[in-house]
Amino acid sequence: MAAGSGTGDTGSGADVRKRKCERRRARRGAIGMAAGKRQREGSAARPRKRAKKAPSAAEPDAKTAPEEYSIPPPVSQGKWKNKERVLIFSSRGINFRARHLMQDLRTLMPHSKADTKMDRKDQLFVINEVCEMKNCNKCIFFEAKKKQDLYMWLSNIPQGPSAKFLVQNVHTLAELKMTGNCLRGSRPLLSFDPAFDKEPHYALLKELFIQIFSTPQYHPKSQPFVDHVFTFTITDERIWFRNYQIIEEDASLVEIGPRFVLNLIKIFQGSFGGPTLYENPHYQSPNMHRRLVRLSVAAKFREKQQVKEVQKLKKTGSKVLMEEDPTEVVFETPAEEKPVEIQLVKPESKPIVKDKKKLRKIQRKKQKKLFRTEASA
């Protein structure tokens, strides 16, 4: 009995273990089925993205829009070949107006670069090395003298030529309140006066302006739009710069700014120096202009002083006596001659009386004395 009971206990223990293993397997299967179901539900809610295939040239696209509605690719997708870079900076000592003009040119020219101000002691040929370090092949350099005169250098680095101008009548974007506006970084049109093609030195300046102020095509910082115009006009032996917006509606022009006038001084063969190719005979330096103004003012003052001195001499000078005119006594009538009477008795002195009342009293007393003397006689 004891042995039989032992075998039965062992059999029941094995059954219990089997049941526990089956329960564990059922639990694992249920967990796996729930996880798979969740995955299937998530995949159904979020469909997988299909990789885009590039349209082949052989397979025509059936859903292409008509040609009139097709949008051409942007212009900036081309390759940037004309790699013109312009360095715009100045010397120390410029005033606020010149600094604002320099900033306006930088904003209008997306292919420009900036640099720190150059010391006055440095020579101008050092600018060639600065441009080489900045990887620039054109330069606009503003040079200030006496804190009132502004000069502009336009140069082609490093061979030249270069031109020096006196900048006059500067008006910046912040100063002018113009109604025009243009996109920042857009490419400008360059408009030149017909006089640029008549003389050789103006033709050289025209080519220099084209290479410096025109934004290269496909430049990374430029926009594929042309919405403003740079105009260069020759008037009074000077070059007048203006910036206008092109209005799409009627293609009219509205000024944006800035505006300034360039008075040509010299054109050099090299960059910031070298042999002189052209010298402006009509140029007058600011120092000479100020000297002439001072001399004219001094001449006016001296003239006034001389007029005053002449007037004083006329007043204080001896009068010239003219000879007697015999015709002056024609219309004079001679008066009757009266006999000369010699007065032997001293006339009575009249009393000086300030008060009229006292004078009347004195007259009355005299009259009373006369009456008394007459009555007594």
Image (spheres, grey):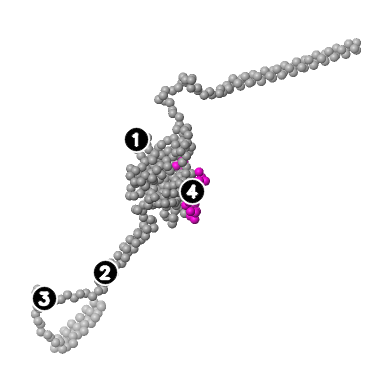
Furthest residue to the front? 275
Which residue position is annotated with label 3? 326
Residue 71: x and y, percent? 43, 28
N-term-proximal mark, 2 vs 4:
4
Q: Nearer the viewer, residue 338 or 145?
A: 145
How far apart, in angstroms, are the residues tagged by discs 2 and 4?
65 Å
Residue 224 visible? The answer is yes
Disc 3 marks a residue whose amino acid type is Pro
Please report the residue visible at 72 percent of the width from the left and 16 percent of the height from the top.
26
How far apart, in angstroms, are the residues tagged by discs 2 and 3?
33 Å
Mark 2 or 1: in front is: 1
Residue 233 visible? The answer is no
Using a 10 Å C-alpha cutoff, classify the residue at mark 1 as few (fewer than 14 neighbours), some (14 to 19) or many (20 or more).
few
Which residue position is annotated with label 4? 128
The number of discs equals 4
Q: Is residue 132 magenta?
A: yes
Residue 251: x and y, percent? 35, 36
Which residue position is annotated with label 1? 250
N-term-proximal mark, 3 vs 1:
1
Disc 2 marks a residue whose amino acid type is Gln
How far apart, in angstroms, are the residues tagged by discs 2 and 1?
68 Å
Q: Which label was assigned to residue 359?
A: none
Disc 1 marks a residue whose amino acid type is Asp
Q: Secondary structure at mark 4?
A: helix
Please report the residue visible at 35 percent of the width from the left and 59 percent of the height from the top.
292
Q: Secondary structure at mark 3?
A: helix
Q: Which label was assigned to residue 311?
A: 2
How far apart, in angstroms, are the residues tagged by discs 3 and 1?
91 Å
The quadrant of the picture occupied by the N terminus is top right
Disc 4 marks a residue whose amino acid type is Asn
Residue 199: x and y, percent? 34, 46
N-term-proximal mark, 2 vs 3:
2
